[in-house]
Image (tube, grey):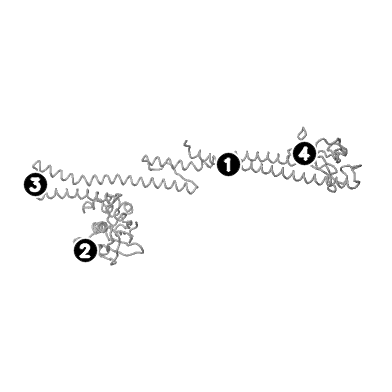
Amino acid sequence: MKRSLRTQMLFQYTAIVIICMVVIPAAISRLLDFQMRRFAEEKFLEDRQEMAAAAGNLYRFSNSWEGVRLGNGANFLRWPIITVTLYDEEGHAVHSLGRGMGKRAHSKDMELMGDSMTPHGCRIIDEPITVGGRVVGHLAFKCMPFNDSREGVFLRRFNRHLYIAMAFMLVTAVFIAFFMAERISRPVLEAARRARLISEGKYRADTEMNSDITEIQTLTDSVNKLASALESQEALRKRLMSDIAHELRNPVTIVKSHLEAFEDGIWEPTPDRIKLTVSETDRLSKLISEVGVLYAIEGENNSLVFENANLSEELERSQLTFAPLFANKEVELVGDIEPSLTVSADMGKLRQAVENLLSNALRYTDKGGKVILSLKSMSSNVEITVKDSGIGISKSDLPNIFERFYRADKSRARVSGGMGIGLAIAKAIVEGHGGTISAESTEGIGSTFVITLPKCRKA
């Protein structure tokens, strides 16, 4: 049976309260009762033995019980004793003392030896009197029951006050437990409500969630950050779908219009027009191919094949490959590559990631600009940097540049042939190698992309 968080916490707090404020005090009360009874019994035993010794001294004085009266030289009526009767060795009553009976109590011959109980619940305890190793008489003590003794009265009062205090503490604790359960569960339930709204696509918070409990505040902050991130991702997804539709629509529309013109006889199928149609088909094919490459790299069974290779030589080849392209645009390409750095990697894919960064830098760096390709060794990593003096990226676009089909400058990208997927492929390749890729940029000054790779591949 499922219960709400508040109900569960209330039950748990109440259970703790019952254990702490009922079970433990009850155990303490029982222990105190046992100890008090034990103390009273031991004290009564000492008193009886002391009184028997005093009576024995009286017997020694005249070597008989003739004329012996209790109370001469000793206090025989100590609490909780009601009456004490002296019997000789034959069981005949010699003298009695009792509360409310004056100096002389009613005496009769001893009928019971040892401990017994009266019909009214009083105890009668026999204590032998020994003189010179011989029993010369007995003292019969009639005492009130423990519950009527001073100790028993004290214990009853103590227990009564304890139970009243326990009841008060229990009621108070239940109220406190209800308050604490409500206080803790409210923000958690609010976070759950926010999560449900997020699942329904409602990302904006309608109420502020605050708590002075660190863990709960962390939870609510995480839910708020999740909502913000999902809202951004949702906006990015919509933009992505729009861009994909646009990228696919353009070449398809152009090819279709050309073929319809050929079919209707409006255009003659000249080599130039056929070449233009084929180029648009190639553009569409290239887009589909790159999406397939990205899917293959990001998939669980990616197509990366690792081997130990000289990364320095591979980057030098990339620099030589791109040198003519940079020269045609009159952009300087500078290499700062540390020699003989070996890593475990899929060099074909890794070169593709680096060349995507070089292609991107060339596309967004104007004539007379400069791009630096560098490689240096760290402690357990290598760092590849592509730094350009291009147009830069705005702060609002920078967090999203590695998303598929995302372009900070759409018009410029379309003119230069970019499809907004190169950086996404580079990120997938780098992360497939266990590395990281990051970017820093300032509008109008340039951008810097940094790839960090482990020298040795982790198993």
Q: How far apart are marks 1 and 3 (CA)?
A: 92 Å
Foreground mark, 3 or 4, reads 4
Q: Which amino acid does label 1 sit on?
A: Val
> Mark number for residue 320?
2
In this view, the residue in front, 316 or 245, is 316
Disc 4 crowd rating (10 Å Cα; few below 14, some 14-19, many 20+) is: few
Disc 3 crowd rating (10 Å Cα; few below 14, some 14-19, many 20+) is: some
209 to the left or right of 98 = left
User: Which quadrant does the C terminus fall into?
Assistant: bottom left
In this view, the residue in front, 424 or 205, is 424
Q: Distance between the residues labelled 3 and 4?
A: 133 Å
Question: Mark 4 vs mark 2: which is more N-terminal?
Answer: 4
Instruction: Provide the residue designation for mark 1.
Output: 17
Question: Mark 3 vs mark 4: which is more N-terminal?
Answer: 4
Tell me the element at label 1.
helix
In this view, the residue in front, 35 or 216, is 35
Question: Mark 2 vs mark 3: which is more N-terminal?
Answer: 3
Q: At x 8% / y 46%, what residue is drawn? A: 269
Q: What residue type is labelled 4?
A: Asp
Q: At x 15% / y 50%, what residue is drawn? A: 279
Question: Mark 4 vs mark 1: which is more N-terminal?
Answer: 1
Foreground mark, 1 or 2, reads 1
Instruction: Provide the residue designation for mark 4.
Output: 115
Foreground mark, 1 or 3, reads 1
x and y, in percent, of residue 23 in the image: 61, 41
Instruction: Provide the residue designation for mark 3.
Output: 269
Q: How far apart are marks 4 and 2 (CA)?
A: 117 Å
Q: How far apart are marks 1 and 2 (CA)?
A: 78 Å
Tell me the element at label 2.
helix
Tell me the element at label 3.
loop
Q: Which amino acid does label 2 sit on?
A: Leu
